[in-house]
Amino acid sequence: MLVPWELGGNAPFIVFDDADIEKAVEGAIAAKFRNAGQTCVCANRFYVHKDIYRVFSQRFVEEVQKIKVGNGFEQGIKIGPLINSKSVDKVQSLLADALNKGADLLCGGKRHDLGDNFFIPTVLGNVAENSLMLEEEIFGPIAPLVIFDDEDKVIESANNTIYGLAAYFYSENPQRIWRVSEKLEYGMVGINTGLISNEVAPFGGVKQSGLGREGSIYGIDEYLELKYLCQGL
């Protein structure tokens, strides 16, 4: 039986010093917090250039604090609960590990009063590279910010994972856009956008993030057998 497999990710979200900060903040919100961070293409690691880190982190926190948590059937609600108590336990464990390694809690960081499975949208600053949440898929509403100052090094950090499903980056430099998009080892790359999934896109990853593609004309290939015909004259 022929089937495509999508096996999760550890998506980096890179904000270069030539990025449009307001667009980057908007994209970061979309890429991180949809479905409370519980999608395979959610941004997992945020790398922000040192020259814009202060401005970006301030604006990002301001917007994150506006996110309304609650019943998804109510108007204006953007985030509901995590899927179960084990998910909350994992989020809290990753959070504690990052804080113990020197991260700054910029907002959130605890369960919501609405119930045990609701977690307040959280942003961490100055997260250490050896933090577990940079290695594992968080699958929750926590955004860890890491400061960088070199393009090659941040690409190396972004690629330093067994996963390769989705990646995101923001830059207004056309040369950098092509250069970085070619170097990122991911099946899907969002350039100046935090939303990449749609029905016409070949959805899938590389490395240990799955086999094959879903969607687009390439998704059909996963269900076909290639036959070679050779006829003599």
Image (cartoon, rainbow, N blue to C red):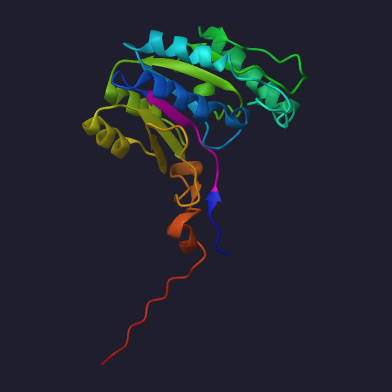
Q: Considering the image in quadrants, where does the N terminus appear?
A: bottom right
Residue 66 lies, with reference to residue 172, above or below; the image says: above
Farthest residue to the right: give it. 115
Residue 13 % position (x, y): 42, 27
Q: Residue at x 41, y 23 (%)?
A: 24
Based on the displayed image, in which of its 4 quarters is residue 34 positioned? Answer: top right
Q: Which of 81 and 211 is in front in this view?
A: 81
Farthest residue to the bottom: give it. 233
- The range drawn in magenta is 6-14
Q: Considering the image in quadrants, where does the C terminus appear?
A: bottom left
Q: Which of 177 and 200 is in front in this view?
A: 200
Q: Is residue 155 left or right of residue 59?
A: left
Q: Which of 175 and 44 is in front in this view?
A: 175
Residue 172 % position (x, y): 28, 27
Q: Which residue is drawn at 29% across and 33% down?
A: 180
Residue 97 % position (x, y): 58, 14
Farthest residue to the front: give it. 75
How many tags in the picture? 0
- Asked whether residue 126 appears in the rendered view, the answer is no
Magenta span includes 149: no
Residue 18 % position (x, y): 28, 21
Based on the displayed image, in which of its 4 quarters is residue 25 positioned? Answer: top left
Q: Which of 221 and 193 is in front in this view?
A: 193
- Asked whether residue 95 appears in the rendered view, the answer is yes
Q: Which residue is drawn at 46% across and 9% down?
A: 58
Residue 204 lies, with reference to residue 58, above or below; the image says: below
